[in-house]
Amino acid sequence: MPSASTGASTTVDAAPPAPAASSPAAPAPTPPDSRLAPGGPGYRRMSFALFLAGVATFALLYSTQALLPLISDEFTVSASQASWTVSAATGALALFVLPMSALSERFGRRTLMTASLVVAVAVGLLVPFAPSIGTLIALRAVQGAALAGLPASATAYLAEEVRPKALITAIGLFVAGNSVGGMSGRVITGWIAQEWGWRVAVGVIGLLAVACAVAFRLLLPAPRHFTAGSLRPRVLARTVRDHLSNPLLRRLYAIGALFMMVFGGVYTVIGYRLTEAPFSLPQGIIGSIFLVYLVGTVSASTAGKLVARLGRRGALYLAGGTTTAGLLLSLADVLPLILLGLVLITAGFFAGHAVASSSVSHTATTGRAQASALYQSAYYVGSSAGSTLGAVAFHSSGWAGTVSLGLLAILGVVAITVLGSHAARRAPALAR
């Protein structure tokens, strides 16, 4: 007999499968860093382009420095008066570098660097035709103002386009271009001026700068990480105020100015010293003295390794000590010792400058162009002051007066660096 129905289904529906235990979501892959790095595409072109920009900048900026004795003779002016052909250029650069950096925030680093070089080169081609010392100084001031668009924009470009670990090396290469430009400008002008006069010499430097400017514009990669900023004065003032309120940046600015005061004073006056007895060297030989700038090329380009080994403050102490030893050696009335002194002064200066300028770019996380501009402004104020005060000291006390000025400046570098060490112990995070 069939069993009674219970009304329950004899078919059991299969339960839906239990959801599989969810595994933690894999983190999104980190996008590759598209900034330039050594060995990567574009890095070599970028480095060479900015190297050439540095060559043109320093060759133009200091084109009259090795020629000051000849300029003094032609216009019948003193060493301190002739030194204004250098001081006017560096002083105008110091005055205009901050406004130019603001323009670079709005219109782009590469655009402003190109425009600066074009104007500076055009003025450089007019300099040989200056009819008086006043006109020459005025043209040099315009040239310095034009060049103001290049240094701060270059370091800001590097800070944006180069990976952080390669930044000190990249800025060191740019500074190395400065040293090559300073050297080649002085050596070339020295020998050419000996044969054809200072006017032909500065004209040749103008043509050299034309070639560098054209190659720079063709080689420099287009920026990929630039973001346009504001030109509003209130925004610029706030950015500048923020940078000047940073104790580390203030110390770096002062260090750059003091190092450059030494360098500007020594190389403005050395030509006068070597044309006098007991040396009485011809202009071509005096120009060749500036071959010691090659030492600066090496010391600047190796600044990254120096910081990696000794730290920023250790590298600054070493740069200051090297410069001091060079100043003391240069007091001897023996030409080989003077040359060795110049080698040490040059090596110490370029190492200190590369360390300080790259530290500014590393420290500033916003408004990098303004941070670099403030450093460049302080740096060229130091150059202008060193050129003028060094010449005055030489006129009143001879070479010993110029050396004394340099030693005081290096003492300031050491004092500021010691202050930074104390600040680092009190607030390590701020001083990094």
Image (cartoon, helix red, strand yellow):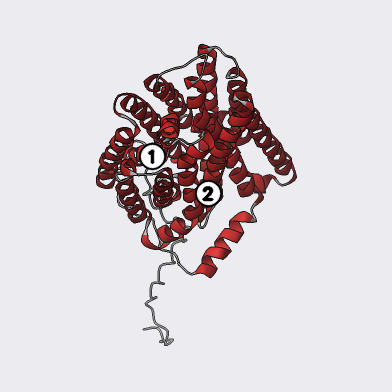
| Residue 65 image position (x, y, % from top left) | 44, 34
Q: Mark 2 points at which residue?
A: 377
- What residue appears at the point 54 percent right and 25 percent down from the top-left corner? 345
> Is residue 211 or residue 320 the one in the foreground?
211
Q: How crowded is mark 2: few (under 14 residues within 10 Å), some or many (20 or more)?
A: many
Residue 1 visible in the snapshot:
no
Which quadrant holds the N terminus?
Answer: bottom left
Secondary structure of residue under mark 2: helix
Relative placement, left or right, of 188 versus 295 is left
Q: Name the residue under label 1.
A: 54
| Residue 95 image position (x, y, % from top left) | 51, 53
Is residue 425 placed above or below 247 in the rendered structure?
above
| Residue 100 image position (x, y, % from top left) | 44, 57
| Residue 41 image position (x, y, % from top left) | 29, 41
> What's the amino acid at mark 1?
Gly
Q: Residues within 10 Å of mark 1 (few under 14, many from 20)?
A: many
User: Would you say the residues marked 1 and 2 are in contact, meaning their CB atoms lie under 8 Å apart?
Assistant: no
User: Quick one: label 1 or label 2, which is nearer the N terminus?
Assistant: 1
**In the rendered image, which quarter is residue 352 located in?**
top right
- What residue appears at the point 33 percent right and 48 percent down from the top-left corner? 123
Secondary structure of residue under mark 1: helix
- What residue appears at the point 75 percent right and 45 percent down from the top-left corner? 426
Is residue 167 placed above or below 142 in the rendered structure?
above
> Is residue 224 or residue 17 the one in the foreground?
224
Is residue 71 placed above or below 326 in the rendered structure?
below
> What's the amino acid at mark 2?
Ser
**In the rendered image, which quarter is residue 103 located in?**
bottom left
Residue farthest toward the front in the current orientation of the protein? 76
Relative placement, left or right, of 332 versus 201 is right
